[in-house]
Every structure is written in structure tokens, then in C-alpha cells.
Image (cartoon, grey):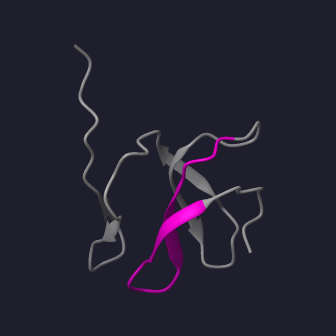
Amino acid sequence: MLTRPIREAIRPAWSPDGRAIAFFSVSATEQMKAGLYVADADGHNLRWLTSTVSVAYPVWSSDSRSIFYSSDKRGEE
């Protein structure tokens, strides 16, 4: 169970070592921004990584140290 309110957690991906989970939240709340998050397996230590919400499924590196995703978000113009 996550320790902060999540309205909608989608596209979850467990790290290969089973110690963390990455997911997207598309519903922003007062406590949370929409975007990519990672949390410990027990739901603690929730961390916001990016505000990108229009992305493909997150994929962990084999050593569980990195998360890869694709996005259609463009840089500043």
C-alpha cells in the first residue's frame, strides 16, 4: 500500500530485484503531481521523477538502477 493518496496509479512496473515499483499517476492531487513515480515495494519512500504523463510503459534496467520510458513531450521551444 502506498503511503500517500494516489487517485490513479497506472502502468506499474516492478524492478527486477523486487525492491521498488514504478508507475504513472495521471490524477494530480494537492499532495501529488501527475507524472512518473517510484516507491519502495512496501509503499514507502515515494519519489516523483518526472511530470511527463503521455508516455509508454516504464521499463527497469536489469540492475534495477534505471528506469526507461518514451514520451511524446517536446523540449522547450
1 in relation to 69, above or below: below
Image position of 45 (left or right of 69): right
Q: Quadrant of residue 44?
A: bottom right
Residue 3 highlighted magenta (yes or no): no
Q: Quadrant of residue 52?
A: top left
Image position of 31 (left or right of 64): right
User: Which of 61 and 57 lies nearest the eye of the viewer?
Assistant: 57
User: Which of 67 and 56 lies nearest the eye of the viewer?
Assistant: 56
- Picture residue at 25% right of the left edge, 52% below the top: 70
Q: Magenta stretch mostly in which secondary structure?
A: strand
User: Which of 45 and 29 lies nearest the eye of the viewer?
Assistant: 29
- Picture residue at 33% right of the left edge, 71% below the top: 60
Where's residue 23, x and y in %?
A: 50, 63
Span colored in magenta:
9-28
Where's residue 55, x and y in %?
A: 34, 51
57 in relation to 37, above or below: below
Q: Number of numbered discs present? A: 0
Residue 26 highlighted magenta (yes or no): yes
Q: Quadrant of residue 66?
A: bottom left
Image position of 75 (left or right of 40): left
25 in relation to 20, above or below: above
Where's residue 17, x and y in %?
A: 43, 86
User: Which of 16 and 53 lies nearest the eye of the viewer?
Assistant: 53
- Picture residue at 31% right of the left edge, 69% below the top: 59
- As drawn, the residue found furthest toward the bottom would be 17
Question: Which quadrant holds the C terminus?
Answer: top left
